[in-house]
Amino acid sequence: MWCFEARFHSVLASFIRSLVVPSVQYEREILNLKDGGQVALDWLEPSKNSNAEYNTILFLPGLTGDSDCEYVRAVSIAIQKAGFRVMVFNYRGIGGVDLKTPRSYSANNIEDLTEIIDHVKQKYPKSVLGGLGISMGGLILGNYLQSNEQLTHKHFSAAMIVSVPWNLNSTSSNIEKPVLNLMICSYLANCLSTQVKKNSKLLNSPNHKWNYNEVIKSKTIREFDRNYTIKMFGYNTVEDYYDSASLHDKIDRFNIPCLFLSAADDPFSLKRDIPLELATTTDNVAILLTARGGHIGFVEGFWPFSEKSEFMLRLIGQYFSGILKNDNYKQFSS
């Protein structure tokens, strides 16, 4: 019953947001990458009466999410209302932009993110930069936060990560269980395969390390990663890739304040994998664990069709307002 409630919570939140969240008029920028690839960066400026010139939130969506997804629009509007500039990072091949090279993205490759951060710093050299990652976006952001790039340059001043799959090997096993989990898993695998099909001219070649026909027939996320992702990014096994991308054993390397929001009933993140004890050993990381919320759900109250019901949106705005304004992030050890 608990599992059913979790899926219902997540689906309900998605359905409600699709009904009540308005469209967002982003300002799109196409960024050409060093290897010939390109990504779409969607900017949303704060209201003119806010004092947010030096505060920018870089937002990384989930596995197949882009700036037009209902939860991305809802979060972007919440960040804007909190008085910050937001930039949504649409991964390669996402957001209506076709691949320009035979390479996409993975849960722990931070090369594109590093280029984007450099671009933001050049565009707004005085900007205080915050990072927000949801689901797989949280994995990419978290892997950047524990990298030498962040430890050396300290580009991010604070971060928040929502509904992250803490341990991908556990996540993969859990979402392959019948019936509801497997349906969600199959749907996401189909979305990933569809992205590959849209770029078949680039990706369907005997010269590549992957077999195109095997990739587009993938029935689960694990199959897709085994057939495609690990071959693109040079891993021997999908288990090695998942170990490398997971965050449950890395948060003690973060050198900035980071708030995690997880739900105990999230099918993508088992409660046993949430590193609550490790979080108590670091001054920079806090984990907020709710009993309910599902995956990117967190809707509360008797009438869910209002902003007040969106616990996740309120928390995001309150956190960044509290940690970035007045330089409160400087109180944390680096």
Image (cartoon, rainbow, N blue to C red):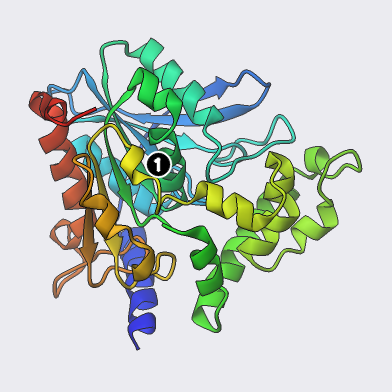
Quarter holding the C terminus is top left
Quarter holding the N terminus is bottom left
Q: Is residue 238 above or below residue 325?
A: below
Disc 1 designates what residue? 142
* 45 vs 34, nearest the viewer: 34
Is residue 331 found left or right of 316 in the rendered image?
left
Furthest residue to the left? 326
Local crowd size for mark 1, using a 10 Å CA cut-off: few (<14), some (14–19), many (≥20): many
Residue 138 seen in the current view: yes
Furthest residue to the right? 206
Is residue 327 found left or right of 160 in the rendered image?
left
Q: Of the residues shown, which amino acid type is indicated by label 1? A: Gly
Residue at (68% x, 21% y) in the render: 36
Residue 24 seen in the current view: no
Residue at (37% x, 38% y) in the render: 59
Counting from the top left corner in percent of width and height, residue 41 is at 46, 29
Furthest residue to the bottom? 1
Choose top left, top right, bottom left or bottom right for residue 127.
top left
Counting from the top left corner in percent of width and height, residue 161 is at 32, 47
Counting from the top left corner in percent of width and height, residue 210 is at 81, 48
* 227 vs 81, nearest the viewer: 227
Is residue 53 found left or right of 105 in the rendered image?
left
Residue at (84% x, 52% y) in the render: 211
Element class at badge 1: helix
Residue at (60% x, 35% y) in the render: 97
Choose top left, top right, bottom left or bottom right for residue 154.
top left
Q: Is residue 123 above or below residue 137?
A: above
Counting from the top left corner in percent of width and height, residue 128 is at 24, 21
Q: Is residue 43 above or below residue 280?
A: above
* 204 vs 269, nearest the viewer: 269
Number of numbered discs: 1
